[in-house]
Image: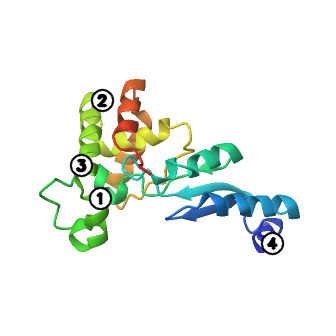
Amino acid sequence: MRTLDGLVESGTVNYLGLSSGAPDAWKAVRANELAERKGYEPFSVTQPRYSVVDREIEANYLPMCREYGLGVVPWSPLAWGFLTGKYGRDSAPEDATASADDRFSERYLTEENFAALDVVEDVAAETGATPAQVALAWQLRHPDVTGPIVGARTVEQLDENLAAADVSLTEAQFERLSEAKRFEW
């Protein structure tokens, strides 16, 4: 924390962020408590993996962020492209991530995730949006999310992702998406 504080003090960085594929609420709290004790700059934002199908942070990480006032800026809000709707239960595009990565297939191509994707696609049909826009709109409406990090590879994907800001979800649609998949202990 002392080294990170030095980066802020020197003007090299303005704020400190914490990024993790497997976020640990205890480590984040411990780091910020140490910063407070020593007078160092604390972490002000965190960057966990979070999406309609990646919900592990709901058990203790999101409540910790809420309690300590940490901004939440999730990476992979489209679950490596799974929530774009381009994957089917029995098919994937030839150039898709799933075609080249067994970890993707094991993590995302499950019946539980396809059931959640069905909800995303239903809400997309109701709103006239794409599944990707609905998945991003869910995060934009989420009270614990500051804003998602999009990973567009093309200008068309970027335009589609940015249009999520214009998608209005009703409370019922937001709740359906929130209930589509819950983290189970």
Residue 41 visible somewhere in the drawing: no
- Between the C-alphas of marks 4 and 1, the distance is 39 Å
Where residue 154 appears, as percent x and y from the top left, is 34, 59
- Which quadrant would residue 41 be assigned to in this image? bottom right
- Distance Cα–Cα, label 2 vs label 3: 20 Å
Residue 125 location (% of width, % of height): 23, 32
Disc nearer the start of the sequence (2/4) = 4
Q: Residue at x 26, y 28 (%)?
A: 126
Residue 46 can be seen, yes or no: yes
Nearest the camera: 67 or 96?
A: 67
Under circle 2, the secondary element is helix
Q: Which residue is mark 2?
A: 127
In this rendering, the label closer to the viewer, 3 or 4? 3
Left of 67 or right of it: where is 54?
A: left
Residue where numbered disc 1 is placed? 108
**Amino acid at pointer 4:** Arg
Of label 1 and label 3, which has the lower sequence position?
A: 1
CA separation in Å, label 3 and label 4: 45 Å
Q: Would you say 47 lies left or right of 86 here? A: right
Residues marked 2 and 3 touching at CB (< 8 Å) = no
Instruction: Measure the alpha-carbon separation of dots 2 and 4.
Output: 48 Å
* Identity of the residue drawn at 52% across and 57% down: 48
Q: Earlier in the sequence, mark 2 or mark 3?
A: 3
**Residue receiving disc 3:** 114
Point out which mark residue 2 bears.
Answer: 4
What element does badge 3 sit on? helix
What's the residue at 29%, 55% (across, down)? 82
Q: Is residue 47 left or right of residue 154?
A: right
Give the mark toward the camera: 2 or 1. 1
